[in-house]
Image (cartoon, rainbow, N blue to C red):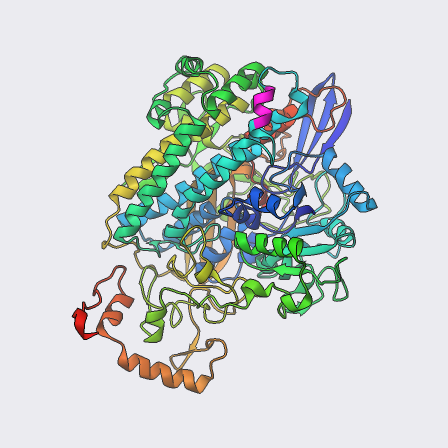
């Protein structure tokens, strides 16, 4: 058995190290280390609760709006306030813009460049892939960066700037949309739709969303090979067997996403061989392998504590180990689409579970589904009607804010006493996915997904390991916060 | 020119903001200035061992380090060990990596307020003992100390902002690459004067409300944000409202207060961010370069003269009263 320490792990958000025990050319055991601790939960203690709207987004530069929304929802829960329709639509648009921009950034800049590595020079698809996706120099980046930047003009209009906006409020948005701005939003979304249809899918969004089975996807890919980057990815996935790489626990959670008018665009739930009820009270964070003090059993985040202990024996990461009913779960776009019940994703997971290929397909599917919803939300905005309910935060209260960030389920738990923050606890998507072992020794989702990955002779940073890690679209700055 | 970018106690938001550089896009902008990315944690192909090999060659001087960009605060804790951030793949604290590489750098840039001054990471009880590269809040020193000078003979260049505007970064890098920067190009906090000699107030679309002290009372109101909602735009050094963000945005255009994020210690204003502390109805923080007596006098005069249109629109979320259309010939 040989040990590999892999890091710095780039093209993920933040710093990441993975320790691998390798035997017979396969990963036998993996330990995931989130090596950066900043202490946001400690920084927030004692502050005016409203200040979370400034501080929480700064946990993360890529999930900034998601953090803002979770904080705003937690304050709204504490204050018992609800958003007017316009407020819900506008905040949904801002969150959707961030999530879709993140999906785009992940696919084109973080994930695909690994297939342009010289390690794949013998594959039939290599020449085209290298030309299109090579890090920093591939042709895709030159198209994606401007398309992403234009799409994010939505942020300039609705959130002032991205990242780190203060427009998202418990009662809605501080930025009322005027009539001419509503029209400009439609033109921004329209341009992004045309980019996706031309470059990413090579087909109208409606055709992608209508794919309802693994077989339909295969037929769609075969009909026009090489047209659009999704088809290019499917060809690579097929050749490398990415549907057999990186399977974790196959238990999936989504908090549900994009509320408006009493319903949500994506349903919440737990999926374990079928739909199950999601019991939020059964969430608890285990600290046994984290550099965190606190010897008692796992705590629900509403009562959680964060006291760093860099010297703790048997610990190997700053990340806590959240469990749902004592079990490891996976979160992300795949979980979201599975729980919501999109037929293509249901069929793919029934066939091959959670894996590198299916995670990427779910993300791209979501690009199409959410963009179409954004068009409807913009049309439903009514300038002149209220955008923000005024909110008074009580001096004594608790609140919970749940949101789906691009990379999965994000929760904030807030306790206010005498008008100040008594406790603030955060469980981020990658806290779930990249958690360490718990007290029972059960490894986290990524740690499980890495077992069995191929390590080629001479590899110190195995490329299969990189595909698996990046397939989760990890955000390490959120993970520990 | 070679550019190396490392991240420590920050959120990565300055990098993500930088990706939004437009016309031309980021990669073209850098290429046009002859800047080559040696390694960037979000953008480069190299991972793990490949990166450590590269850093070793930079440390020996085999690979020249023209531009060192550090994003995120420097974490000295716990107890001076730097163990709150050991650079992945090494057991070495990031503060040690940064100190060693800074000694090799021709130009050293702090990207964002965290790297410049400590920023939000140094907020509250500052649990990680975070500081900036050459400042700790408003105090000179920081990780590298007051005597540090890069190969170019300059202190750390503080491209402050939370996050930084993409062009503050690209224009600073281009200025260095094309013409070089001098000490006179930096302000008292070593921020590039190109953007730091402006105020956020300049070009704010709420200026007519400001002139008449027609103030917003609550989020989504159209009025001036200074009197009640914590806006520091009249004091904040940055060109946000003349340069604009993500196409046509800025904080005040987005409906919320400027929180002076290019400034050291902005993270601890001493009051709730979205609330203006005032004494006898007069905001404590006056506009920069404005004598207090004159501000009080002009404000009360302006308030008395506030037109009905501004008084009503200031507390509305849409234009409740449009400007009067005046007969063309009597202008």
Q: What residue lies at 32% left-to-right and 67% top-to-bottom?
A: B223
A259 lies above or below B133: above
Indicate left or right for A452 with B217 as reference.
right
Left or right position of A139 against A416: right
Q: Residue furthest right?
A: B60
Residue A405 seen = no
Question: Which residues make up the magenta segment?
Answer: A126-131
Horizontal placement of A295 versus A324: left or right? right
Quadrant placement of the N terminus of chain A:
top right
Task: Judge by depth and name the residue closer to the eye, B162 or A276.
Answer: B162
Q: Position of residue B1 (x, y in %)?
A: 70, 47
Judge whether A214 appears above or below A36 on screen. above
Q: Nearer the viewer, residue A462 or A153?
A: A153
Q: Position of residue B27 (x, y in %)?
A: 57, 42
Within the image, what quadrant is residue B316 found in?
bottom left
On screen, residue A328 versus residue A28, left or right, reads: left
Q: Is residue B16 above or below residue A440?
A: below
Assign the magenta stretch its main secondary structure: helix
Classify residue A245 by image quadrant: top right
Q: Residue at x 69, y 59 (%)?
A: B133
Residue B154 shows in the view: yes
In the depicted view, which residue is nearer to us: A63 or B65? B65
Magenta region includes residue A127: yes
**Image coordinates for residue A190, horizontal then vertical, percent:** 34, 37
The percent position of residue A317, horizontal first and vertical second, equals 66, 40
Question: Is A439 in the magenta?
Answer: no
Q: How many marks?
A: 0
């Amino acid at each position: 058995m040989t040990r590999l320490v892999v890091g710095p792990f780039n093209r993920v958000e933040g710093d990441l190290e993975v320790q691998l025990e390798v035997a017979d050319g396969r990963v036998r055991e993996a330990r995931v280390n989130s090596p950066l601790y900043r202490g946001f939960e400690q920084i927030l203690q004692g502050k005016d609760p409203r200040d979370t709207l400034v501080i929480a987004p700064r946990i993360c530069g890529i999930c900034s709006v998601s953090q803002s929304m979770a904080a705003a929802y937690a304050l709204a829960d504490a204050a018992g306030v609800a958003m007017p329709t316009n407020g819900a639509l506008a905040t949904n648009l801002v969150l959707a813009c961030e999530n879709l921009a993140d999906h785009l950034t992940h696919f084109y800049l973080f994930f695909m460049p690994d297939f342009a590595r010289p390690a794949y020079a013998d594959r039939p698809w290599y020449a085209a892939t290298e030309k299109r996706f090579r890090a920093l120099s591939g042709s895709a980046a030159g198209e994606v960066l401007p398309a992403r930047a234009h799409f994010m003009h939505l942020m300039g209009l609705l959130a002032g700037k991205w990242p780190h906006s203060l427009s998202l409020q418990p009662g809605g948005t501080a930025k009322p949309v005027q009539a001419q701005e509503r029209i400009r939003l439609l033109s921004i979304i329209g341009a992004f739709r045309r980019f996706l249809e031309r470059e990413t899918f090579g087909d109208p969004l409606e055709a992608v969303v209508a794919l309802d089975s693994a077989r339909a996807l295969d037929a769609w890919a075969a009909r026009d090979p090489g047209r659009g980057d999704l088809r290019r990815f499917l060809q690579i996935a097929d050749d490398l067997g990415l549907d057999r790489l990186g399977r974790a626990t196959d238990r999936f959670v989504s908090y549900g996403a994009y509320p408006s008018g009493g319903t949500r665009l994506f349903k919440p739930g737990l999926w374990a061989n079928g739909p199950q009820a999601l019991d939020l009270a059964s969430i608890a964070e285990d600290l046994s392998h984290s550099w965190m003090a606190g010897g008692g059993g796992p705590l629900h985040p509403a009562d959680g504590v964060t006291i760093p202990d860099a010297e703790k024996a048997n610990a190997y990461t700053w990340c806590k180990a959240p469990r749902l009913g004592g079990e490891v779960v996976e979160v992300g776009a795949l979980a979201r689409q599975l729980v919501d019940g999109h037929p293509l994703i249901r069929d793919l997971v029934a066939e091959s579970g959670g894996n590198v290929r299916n995670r990427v397909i779910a993300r791209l599917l979501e690009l199409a589904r959410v963009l179409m919803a954004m068009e409807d939300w913009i049309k439903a905005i009514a300038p002149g009607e209220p955008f923000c309910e005024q909110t008074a935060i009580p001096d004594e209260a608790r609140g919970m804010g749940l949101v789906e960030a691009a990379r999965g389920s994000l929760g904030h738990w807030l306790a206010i006493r005498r008008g100040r923050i008594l406790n603030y606890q955060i469980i981020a998507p990658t806290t779930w996915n990249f958690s360490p072992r718990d007290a029972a020794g059960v490894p986290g989702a990524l740690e499980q997904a890495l077992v069995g990955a191929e390590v080629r002779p001479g590899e110190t940073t195995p490329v299969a390991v990189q595909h698996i890690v990046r397939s989760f679209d990890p955000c390490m700055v959120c993970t520990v916060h | 020119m070679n550019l190396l970018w490392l991240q420590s106690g920050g959120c990565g938001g300055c990098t993500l903001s930088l990706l939004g550089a437009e016309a031309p896009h980021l990669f073209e902008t850098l290429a046009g200035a002859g800047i080559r990315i040696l390694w960037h944690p979000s953008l480069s192909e190299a991972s793990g061992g490949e990166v450590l090999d590269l850093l070793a060659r930079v440390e020996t001087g085999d690979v020249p380090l023209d531009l060192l960009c550090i994003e995120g605060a420097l974490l000295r804790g716990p107890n001076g060990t730097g163990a709150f951030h050991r650079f992945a793949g090494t057991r070495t604290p990031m503060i040690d990596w940064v100190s060693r590489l800074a000694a090799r750098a021709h130009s050293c840039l702090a990207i964002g307020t965290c790297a410049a001054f400590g920023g939000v990471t140094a907020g509250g009880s500052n649990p990680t003992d975070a500081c900036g590269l050459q400042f700790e809040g408003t105090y000179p020193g920081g990780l590298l100390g007051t005597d540090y000078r890069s190969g170019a003979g300059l202190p750390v260049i503080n491209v402050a902002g939370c996050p930084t505007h993409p062009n503050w970064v690209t224009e600073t890098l281009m200025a260095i690459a094309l013409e070089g920067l001098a000490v006179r190009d930096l302000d008292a906090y070593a921020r590039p004067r190109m953007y730091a000699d402006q105020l956020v107030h300049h070009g704010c679309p709420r200026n007519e409300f400001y002139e008449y002290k027609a103030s917003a009372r609550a989020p989504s109101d159209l009025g001036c944000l200074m009197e009640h909602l914590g806006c520091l735009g009249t004091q904040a050094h940055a060109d946000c409202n003349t340069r604009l963000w993500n196409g046509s945005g800025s904080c005040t255009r987005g409906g919320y207060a400027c929180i002076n994020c290019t400034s050291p210690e902005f993270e601890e204003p001493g009051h709730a961010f979205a609330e203006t502390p005032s004494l006898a109805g007069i905001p404590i923080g006056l506009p920069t370069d404005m004598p207090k007596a004159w501000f009080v006098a002009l404000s009360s005069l302006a308030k008395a003269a506030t037109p009905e249109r501004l008084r009503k629109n200031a507390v509305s979320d849409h234009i409740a009263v449009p400007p009067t259309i005046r007969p063309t010939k009597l202008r």
